[in-house]
Image (spheres, helix red, strand yellow):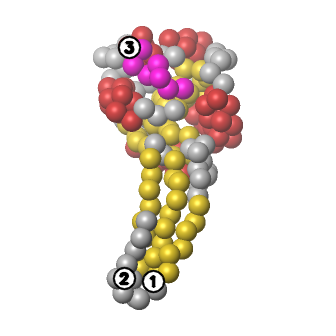
């Protein structure tokens, strides 16, 4: 790569991203090329699905503070989650078990549509019915939404590489 005829006051940054692997960043300042290698192969791509915008915002902000984790999208319904999962192919889907269109989208349809991703279910309910529903949705684990922040990162890292269900 060759850069010529750049004014000395030029500040241009070029970066290349492919498949969420940030490879190299070139920065041109005062005619000099500075290269910083930033190899982030282990990025965990997450789709956050919850019908509460407040919950999505809090969890999304929390996840964005961790290096190696990227929230690629947020959804508020099961239908939207299915569409985004097909388009973005996230590694992990953090899925609220009960959302507004739960009577329209079956657990079996969700499981089939999200099969390429590791599904981590979350709910404020801890009863057997919710655990059974999350299993039917294809979740590898069910996290208590009230205590989500304490176990979320370890669950993501554990289940992103280990697909064995614990439910």
Q: Residues within 10 Å of mark 3 (few under 14, many from 20)?
A: some
Per the image, the residue denoted by label 3 is 109
The residue lying at 34 percent from left, 82 percent from top is 5
User: Which of labels 3 and 2 is toward the front?
Assistant: 2
In the picture, the quarter occupied by the N terminus is: bottom left
Q: Secondary structure at mark 1?
A: loop
Drawn side of residue 24 relative to residue 54, left or right:
right
Per the image, the residue denoted by label 2 is 6
Residue 48 in picture, x, y percent from top left: 46, 37
Task: Measure how far apart labels 3 and 2 are at the Cα level.
Answer: 55 Å
Per the image, the residue denoted by label 1 is 31
Marked residue nearer the N-terminal end (3 or 2)? 2
The residue lying at 63 percent from left, 17 percent from top is 165
Task: Measure how far apart labels 3 and 1 are at the Cα level.
Answer: 56 Å
The correct choice, above or below, for 99 with respect to 22 in the image is: above
Q: As rendered, which of 78 and 26 lies closer to the eye?
A: 26
Task: Read off the magenta span.
Answer: 112-118
Residue 63 in picture, x, y percent from top left: 56, 47
The residue lying at 38 percent from left, 13 percent from top is 109
Q: Secondary structure at mark 2?
A: loop
Q: As rendered, which of 48 and 91 lies closer to the eye?
A: 91
Tell me, yes or no, if residue 100 can be seen here: no
């Amino acid at each position: 790569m060759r850069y010529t005829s750049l004014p000395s006051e030029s500040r241009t940054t070029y970066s290349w991203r492919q498949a969420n692997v940030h490879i190299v960043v070139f920065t041109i300042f005062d005619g000099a090329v500075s290269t910083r290698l930033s190899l982030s192969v282990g990025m965990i791509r997450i789709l956050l699905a919850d019908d509460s915008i407040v919950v999505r915002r809090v969890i999304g902000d929390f996840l964005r503070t961790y290096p190696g984790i990227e929230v690629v999208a947020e959804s508020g319904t099961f239908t939207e989650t299915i569409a985004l999962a097909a388009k973005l192919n996230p590694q992990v889907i953090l899925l609220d078990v009960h959302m507004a269109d739960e009577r329209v989208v079956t657990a079996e349809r969700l499981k089939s549509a999200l099969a390429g991703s590791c599904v981590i279910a979350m709910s404020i309910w801890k009863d057997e019915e919710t655990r059974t529903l999350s299993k039917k949705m294809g979740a590898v684990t069910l996290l208590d939404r009230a205590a989500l922040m304490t176990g979320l990162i370890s669950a993501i890292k554990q289940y992103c590489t280990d697909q064995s269900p614990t439910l």
